[in-house]
Image: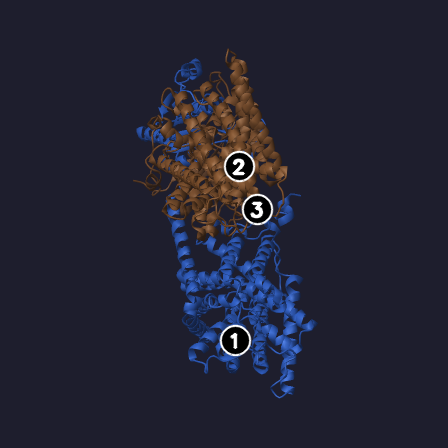
Chain colours: A brown, B blue
Amino acid sequence: MSLTALLFGRRLASDEEEKEQIGPFSGVPVLGLDALASASYGPEAALTVLIPLGALGLRYIVPLSALVIALLTIVYVSYRQTIVAYPNGGGSYIVAKENLGTTAGLIAAAALLIDYVLNVAVAVSAGVGALVSAVPSLLPHTLGLCLAVLILLTAANLRGLRTAGLVFMAPTYAFLGCLFAVIAIGIGKTLLQGGHPTPVVAPPSGHAEASLGTASLWLLCHAFASGCTAMTGVEAVSNGVPAFRKPSSLQARRTLSYIVGSLGVLLAGIALLTRSYGITATEPGQTGYESILSQVVSAVVGRGPFYYATLSAVVAVLLLSANTSFADFPRLCQLLAIDRFLPEPFIHRGRRLAFSYGIGVLAGLSAILLVAFQGITDSLIPLFAVGAFLAFTMSQSGMVAHWRRVGGKRSGLHLAINATGATATAATLVVIIVSKFTEGAWISSLLVLTAFLTFRGVRRHYDRLDAEVRTHEPLDLSPPPPPLVVVPVRRWDLVTQNGLRFALQLSPDVYALQVLLDDPRVEDLSREWPALVEEPAKQKGLTPPRLVVVRSRYRRLFRPLLRFVATVARAHPDRKVAVVVPEVVESRWYHYLLHNHTATILKWLLLFRGGKGVVIVNTPFYLHDAPKAA
Amino acid sequence: MSLTALLFGRRLASDEEEKEQIGPFSGVPVLGLDALASASYGPEAALTVLIPLGALGLRYIVPLSALVIALLTIVYVSYRQTIVAYPNGGGSYIVAKENLGTTAGLIAAAALLIDYVLNVAVAVSAGVGALVSAVPSLLPHTLGLCLAVLILLTAANLRGLRTAGLVFMAPTYAFLGCLFAVIAIGIGKTLLQGGHPTPVVAPPSGHAEASLGTASLWLLCHAFASGCTAMTGVEAVSNGVPAFRKPSSLQARRTLSYIVGSLGVLLAGIALLTRSYGITATEPGQTGYESILSQVVSAVVGRGPFYYATLSAVVAVLLLSANTSFADFPRLCQLLAIDRFLPEPFIHRGRRLAFSYGIGVLAGLSAILLVAFQGITDSLIPLFAVGAFLAFTMSQSGMVAHWRRVGGKRSGLHLAINATGATATAATLVVIIVSKFTEGAWISSLLVLTAFLTFRGVRRHYDRLDAEVRTHEPLDLSPPPPPLVVVPVRRWDLVTQNGLRFALQLSPDVYALQVLLDDPRVEDLSREWPALVEEPAKQKGLTPPRLVVVRSRYRRLFRPLLRFVATVARAHPDRKVAVVVPEVVESRWYHYLLHNHTATILKWLLLFRGGKGVVIVNTPFYLHDAPKAA
């Protein structure tokens, strides 16, 4: 077994892909992880914005959460319709492209890709943040831990991680079970203790001093915009409808209900508990930082084994939720590449049937974000949600156009629902961009724009290429005259002979070109040429190759060569010029350190600078111990 | 004027090299800089070893210096003979190779190359050390300054620095003038004040407490070994005899006398003054560090303008003395490359007639040393002198063999002189290696050994290569059968047509090979092949190319291709297999980001793995806006 096989597993054949057939029970972990994990950073993001209000901020967390939940409900109802209308998978790209045209589709795609990248960065940093809350001594290693997790995820996905199975199910249901229990216990205690329960472990209160007396509308918009990150990932189910068991759209809708329902309960529960326990956010990235979830759980049940079990589930779910992007980003890239908006390598699956190229690009971009923002979730939050809400809006608007096009008796209601969804998400998008613009939303907007322009540019390039090379004409075989052949010759040896012999097979018109530099060991071949080449050629009745010797005063090798080729080509515009480049093939790579790589450089120069009629012929000369053929 | 021309100057023709014709006055700066500069770190190196003795150490500096000067005199007399015997330049490599054989020559060459590299590192670090002594606030930037100077020197040399001229003369004579004046004034004051002059500026005395009561022989050997670094660079004149005006060996001997005389005066003067002013070394690389020369000058004349003038000259001479290596290292590399002990690129001169390759290698190696030793001269000193004294010894031993071979009436005396030189330098070499072994001499010894083995290995490789490719036979032209041609085909377009057309020019036996991966956009060509290719070929009376379609279950492109080529080659061992690789040439480099580089990878794989009979033909297809030919 080779090292690659050990690291990446056996290469899989194209027909070995398993079709996943999932129901709601496995659908929640596979497609809902991203959405559910948002519950652990969304409320925290909102509360962090409220830090300047101190304890006063707690007054606003319940109404803000209620607003987010209301928006979530609207989006939920809208997406149920998308699932029914697009049983083969209705990602935002497809829905927008089919109904609103290519430009809208590409905007949606750009938004989604940026969203996926940010989801990886945020999920990883939030997961590590949760870990650091439980084990504060790890705080200084935040960025290192983030990158380690990213590398692990990338490796697992390159190996072709199966998204179903216990790996995903166990943490998801542990996460839901633990948090539901905490919420139930917490609300029970609150009710029993008259609305003001005593925390088992008091939340850190050092930061709860108010620096602002009252909340401005601006600050509240800000907090709302941050809280909306809790909704990212809701679109995943509508993408994945074909993965469900029949009747798939029913199963998918049921799954979406479970996911959104759970997410709603989590958001509401967390909001109520932070309120009643008086939990405020701590300054992210500073000593003493503790995540909201960690504070809530320790306030409700204390720092016992249950705390650690819950926090472990939170960490696991956050880290695994990054994986949603690893599944969806490369798949969307493939769709775009098939439509020729992205380069071809995105189409091909790697040795384990994963889209290695897309996975690599996603990992690279996320790593850049993590490093740029030092792995601090709070710094990444302002960039997030722009992509998600732009994709929501494009998808919902696409559905509006869809219903208008489809018509029919119930389409009016459907249209109204999706129009509400589109309006609500568009309004939220505006709030997010405006309130977070200087903090980071400008970066996301710029990234979306860049991605969009890239798609356009790539497509334009491929179209232009196609216009020039595509043909359906049969082969044109009007017999061309034989090519002219140029053989650069350094000295008289078997390598040169090998090249000259092949040159004479190609054409009767062969030029041997010797460029003399300042190497005292290389001799002018003029004197010996008649004996070495001309006589033997004449004896066989062949036209002898002509020797041209150029003395390069400026010790330039390639310029005289290219000039000669260009001169020959210009003199015979109707004929191809084949340049035969003789080359020695060595047995060991380090032997190439001893060479001057003339042949390699010459081949490149001829390819790019040779000109239209030039063909490059490379005659390798194998040394005795050169590696054997494949 | 292009950017390269602006940075590196106009390209020079091979016949534009000026012949320098120097006499003793310009010979001292050009060939003596390295030797004279040693005076500023040699005594310091010895005194640094004596630090543990405190003020007691001063007792030993005069006898130690006397020993070094005696050794210098022996080496001087020996080299005068080399100059007479080798009027065309008697570098250690040549003298040792001619008289003692190749192995001895290569050992001398290895020793010299290592010595040159260390000379750059030591000269730069000592120059920066002198600067830092004058401007202590620069101390923390020592390494950065060293590297900046190194980059400057490298750039100047790549541009083709002329070693004659005011750049070298002015600092050299300023250096000699100032230091001679300081020595004269200092000795005068000493005599006037009864042997114990009052320093104008008292040397720092914090480190002058003795931690050892008495000097062991070991410590003294150590100090002597360090002090011997003052002798490095003395061999330069014997290398450069042909550069002198006629009668060149007389002029060269006169120059050597001036250089060695000056060096002797400097060493003796510095020793006497440190003794009488009670100057001890300070801990190198620590705060409060001050070079010995700086202490001597400020003790004798104070920190006035003269101090700064002298120190400036010292800094200039040290930094310029690194340049001796930049002149000699690449020239020795060229000699070795012509004898095929080093790779070919060392032979060729760059755009400004400098040996760019050798200069680059020297700069790289010195940079590694500077970084590894943090730019601290004292840490580099134990590595130094090994190379120089090994080269001295090989050269003197070579001269002994020379006189034995030459015979004649006065050869007995000559032989005796060189034998004394060889014995003295060999003995010193043993002292240096033994006393400095663990501190760094082991590194130099290892480097010399590595260099020696590299020369041997390179030569062996070239010999083996030559044995396989060299021939003086005329071209063998028994008419070979036409090649078999394989054309990898992706889809039907003009690029493919271009390739197929050329393939049919090469031979009637053409295979078109289509490998199908998992790209949904690529169609099997089987159905259309008869209409597209077979019919037109038959109409022209040509054998139609055969289409072979391979479905790659494991999405491998290259393996099936190479397998097919290998199969064809095995089936026809008497014929060449030409693989035609069609390729699109784009107009902009960044367009290549959109390609999958199949053609490039395929060409490489065929070259290295194709096997003996394979020829690679690359048919470029130029897009309309592709760059024009040269």
Q: Nearer the viewer, residue A510 or A472?
A: A472
Q: Amino acid at mark 3?
A: Gly
The residue beneath circle 2 is A62
Q: Quadrant of residue A60?
A: top right
Q: CA distance from mark 2 to mark 3?
A: 15 Å
Left or right of B282 on screen, residue B517: left
Respond whether the residues carrying marks 1 and 3 are from the same subunit.
no
Check disc 2 and give the amino acid type.
Val
Q: Give the residue furthest to the left.
A: A1
Q: Position of residue B8 (x, y in %)?
A: 62, 49
What is the x, y in percent for residue B226?
49, 72
- Looking at the image, the residue that sits furthest to the bottom is B194
Give the residue displayed 54% in from the left and 53% down from the top.
B355
Give the percent coordinates (x, y) of residue B287.
56, 69
The crowd level at tag 2 (other Cα within 10 Å; few <14, some 14-19, many 20+) is: some
Closer to the eye: label 1 or 3: 3
Label 1, on which residue? B47
Chain under disc 3: A
**Helix, strand or loop under label 1:** helix
Tell me which corner region of the image, top left, top right, bottom left or bottom right, holds residue B279. Answer: bottom right
**Which residue is disc 3 drawn over?**
A54
Which tag, 2 or 3, sits closer to the chain's start?
Answer: 3
Q: Circle 1 marks a residue in which chain?
A: B
Question: CA gap, disc 1 to disc 3?
Answer: 67 Å
The label on residue A616 is none
